[in-house]
Image: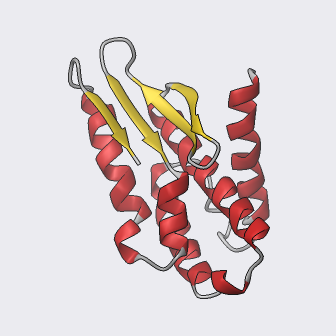
Amino acid sequence: MSTLIDDVVSPANRAVETFRERSNDGLDFSEDSLSIVEEMLAEASAYVAELPQSQVSGLVRLIGCYILEVARTAYGGEYAWLDDTRGPVLVVGEPETHIAIATWDKVRGRLSGDAADSIPFFYQGFADMARTRPPAARTLYI
């Protein structure tokens, strides 16, 4: 595996291990598991202000990479890097179309307590486009 894919797969697998008990073994890289992710982020939002920034960033990375791996498991694709703060992006459909999803900002928003940053709702928009792959589309979900 390339370094970039390792940079996403490794934290995603760590998320599964880290949250195994809390998720009741429900983090299985399925789209349905994103409802568990949503619950966990809603719970964590009540305590995030008490956490050191390094822990918050680590949580964003773990959960953000897990969501990306859910998407890659379902739709394939290749990883690219947006920038240091926005993290990795999964691109599907190349070269006919370009449907991409970046998750770190959305996870940060949900951790801040913003219910409008619903992970399942956000993911569904991406999944609908990734499933249909309209020709010549260039869409980024962020």
Residue at position x 21%, y 25% from top?
A: 134
Q: With respect to residue 128, does 112 lie above or below?
A: below
Q: Position of residue 124 (x, y in %)?
A: 33, 51
Outermost top residue: 95
- Of residue 23 and residue 47, the one placed in the foreground of this image is 47
Q: Position of residue 66 (x, y in %)?
A: 61, 50
Q: Seen in the image, is 3 located left or right of residue 118?
A: right
* Protein image colouring: secondary structure
Q: Seen in the image, is 102 located left or right of residue 87?
A: left
Residue at position x 76%, y 26% from top?
A: 3
Q: Seen in the image, is 130 located left or right of residue 64?
A: left
Q: Seen in the image, is 2 located left or right of residue 26?
A: right
Outermost front residue: 84
Q: Position of residue 15 (x, y in %)?
A: 72, 56
Residue at position x 68%, y 39% from top?
A: 8
Quarter of the image that includes the N terminus = top right
Q: Position of residue 135 (x, y in %)?
A: 21, 18
Q: With respect to residue 76, does 112 lie above or below?
A: below
**Number of marks present in the image shown:** 0
Q: Quadrant of residue 44?
A: bottom right
- Of residue 25 and residue 126, the one placed in the foreground of this image is 126
Q: Quadrant of residue 57?
A: bottom right
Q: With respect to residue 22, does 79 lie above or below?
A: above
Residue at position x 65%, y 43% from top?
A: 84
